[in-house]
């Protein structure tokens, strides 16, 4: 891929060594030089306007591309103290570039639902910039159901002020290459975050879950639980980093990535990292890659459950736990339904 | 009902023979006990009957009511009525006990071409049975066997057995991990299932369980086959004299 004004990330760059966007993108992909047809639905009281793009010298190449092609920024503002039963919904990230800003005022509490359903042969590059004012709570749900020839990079920057909370659950099925990247800066005391995800990959799908949590203030509380299953020749990538700066004492941050390989030809690349400068913290990471428990499968079959069903039940039980922290029961059931749909496909 | 003839089984890719010509017949309505020294192949027999991978049958036949068990997948054997009460029941995290059992029951029914059991009937039956077995109701809501004690797991095996109502029951060291009270509850459950249409094979190292579930026949499994057989009193003799005479 050579005809872009800014070079795409490639495997020569450490952060992209397992997700070579430059290689995955072909010249004829839809959306390379276009704005995404973004649609945003908001509850009454929340405003959406268009504002000019702000650029700076250290913008990433993907951000620069979005600045060039996405047009104005979609600017969503949730007022102080706002709460609603209805979510903010972002649709239309089907192809092209987008820049979206979401600001939650003090004490606001809202759900954000993003559906990433790309077109065949599309390239999607979206940047979401989230600001959580003090005590704001964002319940974010991402469902990614792209076709197998779609390339998607969805980058989110979260700035979290004191005692604000991000609760994020993602369900991803990969694509030709998909990367869901969450970068969070904890800028106030007592920031909380739950960053959970499940990915299910078959064929030659590739899914990259990357996150970078940078804590600058005390009493942060982070829980990250990412689980995946891979089949055929699929490839799962997990890169997680907690960066705990010197003032961030009493941080309690735990990261887990657990994956089951359902085929010997699939691939998992994992890099959990902790970088800690504060001396009074609890931080840990764990990473496992395994297969379904053969003994458990035999036990289930001995009770009469056919092999395919036993596998699906064990896999659902394994993956489904990442959504236990999702309060919205209807949403949780809808995610589990999608997960079951994947497990039940022939 | 169950007819095993000249069964040869090896493990480690056929390198290590365990059973070398075992023949055994359990007629309908009878309870047979298999006793024997550690390492004689008692658990191997239970796994071969139920189709676990890793056990190579190199010769012989196993038939249940004339049907070749060895040709069937484990779930097909279950649907045909074969039930194994595991020596070490597995924990299944994330799958609630009731969901597991309802799925199993209805999968078996479906395989036999029967109508599935509806949720209300299933719940009613399960609750009544749990009460009989003196099981805490919350056990049924928890993921199967997760965090259960050894005794609770064994009781859960009996609970599943009574819910599934199998034709042929294999019990592998069911008495291990049970105190006397639990043993009595389990034995009562098993005795309730004794019927003219059902066969049972009780695998045990100790005679204790056979005080509560009195067998029609007792066999000693040693040196890869049935080394001796007798009636219920034979088990008591084995308990006092040990297996040395057969293991040599």
Image (cartoon, helix red, strand yellow):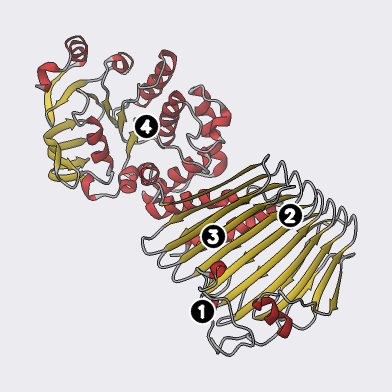
Question: Mark 4 highlights which residue?
Answer: B88
Whether residue B17 sits left or right of residue B208 in the image: it is left
Question: Mark 1 highlights which residue?
Answer: A24
Measure how far apart labels 4 and 2 are at the Cα level: 43 Å
On screen, A8 above or below B27? below
Question: Mark 3 highlights which residue?
Answer: A238
Whether residue A174 sits left or right of residue A253 in the image: it is left
Q: How many numbered discs? A: 4
Question: Mark 2 highlights which residue?
Answer: A166
Q: Nearer the viewer, residue A286 or A326?
A: A286
On screen, A32 above or below B35? below
Task: Indicate which disc, 1 or 2, sits on the residue closer to the N terminus.
Answer: 1
Task: Indicate which disc, 2 or 3, sits on the residue closer to the N terminus.
Answer: 2
Labels 1 and 2 in the same subunit: yes
Task: Indicate which disc, 1 or 3, sits on the residue closer to the N terminus.
Answer: 1
* Residue B171 at x, y percent in the picture: 31, 29
Badge 1: few (under 14), some or many (20 or more) residues near its Cα, within 10 Å? some
Please state which of the two labelled residues, at mark 4 or mark 2, is closer to the viewer. 2
On screen, B6 above or below B150? below
Badge 3: few (under 14), some or many (20 or more) residues near its Cα, within 10 Å? many
Quarter the N terminus of chain B occupies: top left
């Amino acid at each position: 891929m050579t005809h872009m004004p800014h070079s795409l990330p490639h495997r020569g760059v450490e952060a992209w060594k397992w997700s070579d966007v430059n290689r995955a993108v072909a010249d004829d992909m839809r959306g390379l030089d276009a704005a995404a047809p973004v649609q945003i639905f908001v509850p009454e009281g929340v405003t959406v306007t268009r504002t000019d793009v702000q650029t700076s010298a250290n913008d990433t190449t993907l951000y620069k591309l979005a600045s060039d092609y996405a047009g104005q920024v979609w600017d969503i503002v949730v007022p102080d103290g706002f709460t609603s039963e209805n979510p903010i919904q972002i649709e239309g990230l089907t192809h092209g570039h987008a820049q979206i800003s979401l600001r939650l005022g003090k004490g606001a509490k809202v759900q954000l639902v993003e559906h990433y359903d790309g077109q065949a042969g599309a390239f999607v590059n979206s940047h979401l910039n989230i600001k959580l004012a003090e005590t704001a709570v964002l319940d974010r749900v991402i469902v990614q159901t792209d076709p197998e020839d779609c390339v998607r990079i969805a980058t989110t920057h979260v700035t979290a002020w004191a005692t604000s909370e991000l609760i994020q659950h993602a369900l991803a099925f990969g694509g030709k290459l998909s990367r869901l990247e969450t970068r969070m800066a904890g800028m106030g005391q007592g920031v909380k975050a739950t960053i959970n995800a499940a990915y299910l990959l078959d064929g030659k799908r590739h899914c990259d879950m990357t996150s970078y949590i940078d804590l600058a203030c005390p009493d942060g509380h982070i829980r990250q639980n990412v689980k995946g299953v891979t089949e055929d020749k699929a490839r799962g990538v997990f890169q997680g980093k907690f960066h705990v700066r010197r003032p961030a004492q009493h941080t309690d941050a735990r990261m887990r990535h657990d994956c089951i390989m359902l085929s010997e030809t699939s691939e998992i690349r994992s890099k959990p990292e902790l970088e800690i400068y504060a001396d009074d913290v609890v931080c840990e990471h764990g990473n496992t890659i395994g297969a379904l428990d053969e003994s458990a499968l035999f036990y289930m079959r001995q009770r009469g459950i056919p092999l395919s069903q036993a596998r699906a039940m064990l896999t659902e039980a394994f993956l489904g736990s990442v959504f236990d922290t999702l309060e919205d029961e209807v949403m949780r059931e809808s995610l589990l339904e999608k997960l079951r749909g994947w497990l039940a496909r022939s | 009902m169950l007819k095993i003839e000249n069964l040869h089984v090896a493990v480690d890719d056929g390198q290590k023979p365990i059973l070398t010509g075992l023949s055994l017949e359990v007629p309908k309505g009878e309870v047979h006990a298999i006793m024997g020294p550690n390492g004689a192949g008692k658990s191997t027999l239970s796994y071969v009957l139920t189709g676990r991978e890793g056990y190579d049958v190199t010769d012989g036949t196993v038939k249940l009511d004339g049907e070749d068990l060895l040709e069937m997948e484990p779930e097909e054997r279950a649907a045909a009525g074969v039930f194994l009460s595991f020596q070490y029941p597995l924990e299944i995290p994330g799958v609630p006990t009731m969901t597991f059992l309802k799925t199993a029951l209805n999968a078996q029914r479906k395989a036999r071409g029967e109508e599935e059991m509806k949720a209300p009937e299933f719940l009613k039956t399960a609750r009544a049975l749990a009460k009989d077995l003196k099981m805490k109701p919350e056990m049924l809501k928890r993921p199967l066997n997760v965090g259960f004690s050894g005794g609770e797991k064994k009781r859960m095996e009996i609970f599943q057995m009574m819910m599934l109502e199998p034709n042929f029951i294999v019990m592998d060291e069911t008495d291990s991990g049970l105190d006397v009270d639990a043993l009595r509850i389990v034995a009562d459950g098993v005795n309730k299932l004794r019927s003219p249409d059902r066969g049972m094979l009780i695998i045990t190292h100790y005679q204790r369980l056979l005080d509560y579930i009195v067998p029609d026949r007792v066999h000693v499994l040693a040196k890869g086959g049935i080394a001796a057989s007798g009636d219920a009193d034979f088990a008591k003799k084995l308990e006092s004299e040990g297996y040395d005479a057969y293991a040599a």
